[in-house]
Image: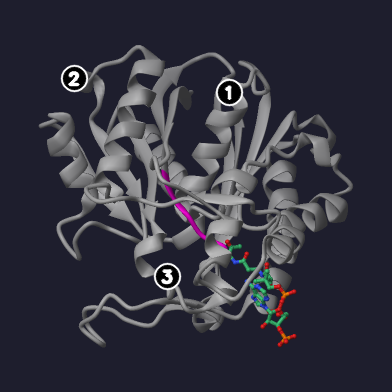
Amino acid sequence: MIRSVVVGVGSELPQNIMTNNDLAKFVDTSDEWITERTGIRARHIAGEGETTKTLAVAAARQALSNAGLSIEDVDLIILATSTPDHTFPATATEVQAELGITKGAAFDLQAVCSGFVYALTTADALLKAGQATCALVIGSETFSRILDWSDRATCVLFGDGAGAFVLQAQKGGNAGILGSKLRSDGRHCMKLYVDGGPSTTRTVGHLRMEGREVFKHAVVNMAENMLEVTTAAGIAMADIDWFVPHQANKRILDSTASKLGVAREKFIITLDHHGNTSAASIPLAFNHGLQNGLIKRGQLVLMEAMGGGFTWGGVLLRF
Ligand code: ACO
């Protein structure tokens, strides 16, 4: 049986850090309000010359080096992003060129904050189908470029960054992706959206959100999905070693953990220092767990996300 094994992980954050106090200098907000309502203390903001592509390339290089593999090994790149460098071509092809990869396929995938679990599931299916042997799965975002910096209800929540996994198709062994479940419900598409686009306004637009609605659906959808993924794989929730959720809001994660009856200490949380980086947040948190000796080989990790669309989904991995 072919399994998609995570053989390398990498991540990248822009140099420039914006704390809550920095924000409060030009937005009517406070460190106290942001920390209490979200758990976020700072976010990284892409500077001149830093784009979704450059962050993705840095994360991908680190993941390849972590895997001990080279560009010759990669025959698939899937880049999850809602903030591409250009409307087209896919930023994934720009990353492919920058890395010097000339074989295989590269494409972008857009499922907003659920992008990374959607991309992992797609890569897993393509590897299992024999379409590719080694995939770079990247989440990279520059949400700072689509924020309305005069809207305090949204601009305090997001940041920029990238993370990447190298997935290799391997036969035998018990490591790899054990199961996943993707969902969406387009009836909620206008609860979290960007008010521009090439085919409507011909502009890029700004992020708009009904925060309370998103919050409510996030807890219910993520908890249900996590149960579905573990049950289908025949794994008890109690046997999961680490939960690596999308990093949107600490209160969403606290509520999800208590709804599932799971110890909060098993949730890897990094949103305090980088805010919501959309599709990049799961690999960023995963790499944090890895670099800090929390996530170890052989452990069971459940990744879970929910985002605009609404989209949501989970991926169960034996690392
Ligand atoms: N600073 C100070 N005050 C603020 C701020 C701010 N940054 N933003 C809003 N307020 C004010 C509002 O104006 C309002 O004031 P009023 O009572 O005088 O009208 C008050 O705070 C309460 O506003 P609410 O929007 O009701 O605040 P709420 O408790 O719902 O918190 C928040 C808002 C943090 C956005 C919350 O709804 C939330 O976390 N939602 C989830 C959204 C999210 O995480 N989205 C990420 C993308 S989706 C995903 O990734 C899952």
User: In the image, residue 168 lies at what x, y percent?
Assistant: 39, 24
Q: Is mark 3 on a helix, strand or loop?
A: loop
Nearer-N-terminus badge (1/2):
2
Mark 1 lies on residue? 290
> Is 172 rendered above or below residue 252?
above
> Is 147 rendered above or below residue 86?
below
Q: Which quadrant holds residue 54?
A: top left
Q: What residue type is labelled 3?
A: Leu
Mark 2 lies on residue? 72
**For the point 22% across and 43% down, which residue is it?**
106
Nearest the eye: 31 or 121: 31
Q: Are marks 1 and 2 in contact (CB under 8 Å)?
A: no
**For the point 51% across and 60% down, which residue is it?**
158
Mark 3 lies on residue? 147
Residue 130 appears in the figure: no
Q: Indicate whether residue 159 is drawn in magenta.
A: yes
Nearer-N-terminus badge (3/1):
3
Side of 315 where 265 appears, left or right: right
**For the point 31% across and 32% down, which residue is it?**
58
> Is 36 rendered above or below residue 27?
above
Q: Distance between the residues labelled 1 and 2?
A: 25 Å
Q: Does the residue labelled 3 lie within 8 Å of ligand 1?
A: no
